[in-house]
Image (spheres, rainbow, N blue to C red):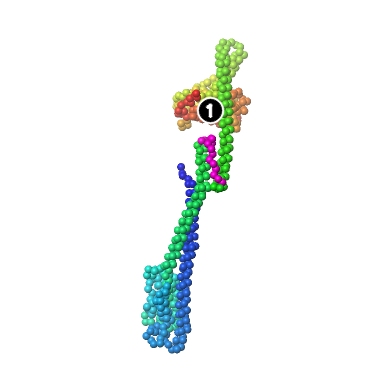
Amino acid sequence: MERRLPVNVRLVGLVGPLLLIFVMLVAWYFPGRQRIRLLEQQVDATAAAVFTQVAADREYYASVVVPRLEALGAPVIAGYHGVPNAFPLPATFLREVTESVSNNGGPYRIRLVSPWPINRASGLDDATQRGAFDELVHTRAASVRRRDLVQGVDVMRYWVADRAVHQSCVECHNGHPESPRRDFRLNDVLGAVEVQIPISTPWHEAQRDQSLLVFGGIALSALLTALVAWGARRVVSVPIGDLSREMTRISAADGVIGDAPALLRPGRNSVAAEIDELWRRFEDMQRKVRGNQERARELTTSLEQQRQRQLAFVAGVVHDLRTPLSSLKMAAALADKAYVDRSDERFRKAADMTRRQVVQMTRMVGDMLDAARIEAGQLELRLEERDVRELVREVVDVFLPSGSHALRLTVPDAPVPARCDPMRVEQVLNNLVSNAIKYSPEGSDVDVVVLEQGEDVVVAVTDRGIGIAPEEVQFLFEPFHRARVARETAPGVGLGLSVAKRIVEAHLGSIEVTSGVGRGTTFRVRLPRRGPDRGPSPER
């Protein structure tokens, strides 16, 4: 049998993962991710401030200082170191300023980089720089940012374009003998200003805090899940488990609650409202079942006493009737023999009527006696192996001399063996054939058919008589019940079919009926070939 999980385990399985995912997402995205984003924003702001300062210094030098120097006749050239009273170009000025800032040991490094030969000392050192420079040239982006590992240090690298802001810069690049281009113009990208800001320590701190938040969230989720499981077990699983065990105890006793004290309902404050309501209804059910059991015991005792009185009455009546019936039967037989040659027709008719009535009363008494034995559990079967065809033929032969109906017998060619009590089987078939003749018009056909169906033998008796109403078929095999049309057609006490059904069931078989008012009736007796293991023994 498939094992079902308790409520608290199911809640853990449902709530735990959802709560864990929720806490992890919250811890990851909000505190952890926000701190990392804040760190990135701080680094971006620092780099932007540096770029702004460098750009302002260069702009001031190019737009204010250089024109004044030129007005004074001072040369502004790239190799100003070897020329007296000469001053550097704006690009050279920018390079030297960034180098001085980097050499001061500050928290970040500034450098002017360029791929052109005139700036050979500031050439591109790695693929990251080359990629960033190409992006500045071809996409005209305002800045480029990359996270990189430089000499084992985790840094954030930024680049902004260094454009030609003075004609002297353009002339120097176009006039350099190794320059690959001769078409530089103002505002062209001549290089890039790179800022490197170390982020190892704050970045790792942010990641550590993020990890702590995640693990703390996992621990909190586990704690909350455990509390949910504990609460579910206390307010749901335990009360329902107690209720289930009480129901199992009652079920094991076949619904008999007995005198054992009922399991106490838990306090209302310790369980959910639905569980408390379930317990309350269960207790109401227990009280009602106890009351019903008491009434059932009283009714059973009363019915048993009534049954015993009925059986004693029937047995007494049958016993008292058998002796006079036997005497009457013997007297009728002797009278018939003594006057067989006389011509007194009235005497002969009276003797015939007496004989028929004796036969009818004998059958009724036999049915009553069998009914009493069945009710007392004293129906005994004497089992033996017999050919069902022969049993059916013997029954049909009994009714053939009457000539009032056309009896048609259909049996297989081969023997049809079955283990049964032949006398009891003949009793059943006698009853069915007799009823078929009794409740069908004189001269009509009555078919008796023997069939083999698997491991069963089926005997069907069909008449063309008055039939049975559908609403009365279900009561047909009850003792002393007779259909309305049958009561109007022929006398009887209504025990024959009840006894026949009990005899067939004692053989582990069944009896079925198909009928309709005015369309005749078919009874089918189904008997297993093997029969019962042994016949029911009388009770002692």
Furthest-right residue in this view: 488
Q: In percent of the image, x 51 and y 24: which residue is there?
A: 378
Q: Is residue 419 above or below residue 358?
A: below
Judged left or right of residue 377, residue 172 is left
Q: Is residue 532 left or right of residue 484?
A: left
- Crowding near the residue tagged with mark 1, few <14, some 14–19, many ≥20 C-alpha atoms within 10 Å: some
Q: Quadrant of residue 487?
A: top right
Q: Report the residue at 55% width, 43% height from top.
A: 265
Q: Magenta span has 245?
A: no
Name the amino acid type tagged 1. Lys
**Which type of secondary structure does the marked residue at label 1 adopt?**
helix
Residue 87 picture location, percent across and down: 41, 85
Q: Which residue is mark 1?
A: 501
Residue at 39%, 79% in the rendered image:
119
Q: Which residue occupies the foreground of this view, 300 or 383?
A: 300
Image height of 241 relative to 28, above or below: above
Magenta stretch: residue 263 in it?
yes
Residue 511 seen by the camera: yes
Please give the name of the residue rendered at 52% of the width and 21% of the height, measured from the top-left corner. Answer: 398
Can residue 183 be spotted in the picture?
no
- Res 320 quadrant in image: top right
Query: In the displayed structure, would residue 348 be above or below residue 53?
Result: above
Tell me residue 94's x, y (percent): 43, 79
Region in magenta: 253-268
- Residue 532 location, x and y as percent? 46, 28
- Secondary structure mainly formed by the magenta segment: loop
Q: Nearer the viewer, residue 474 or 398?
A: 474
- Image location of residue 330, percent across then percent down: 55, 14
Quarter location, residue 191: bottom left
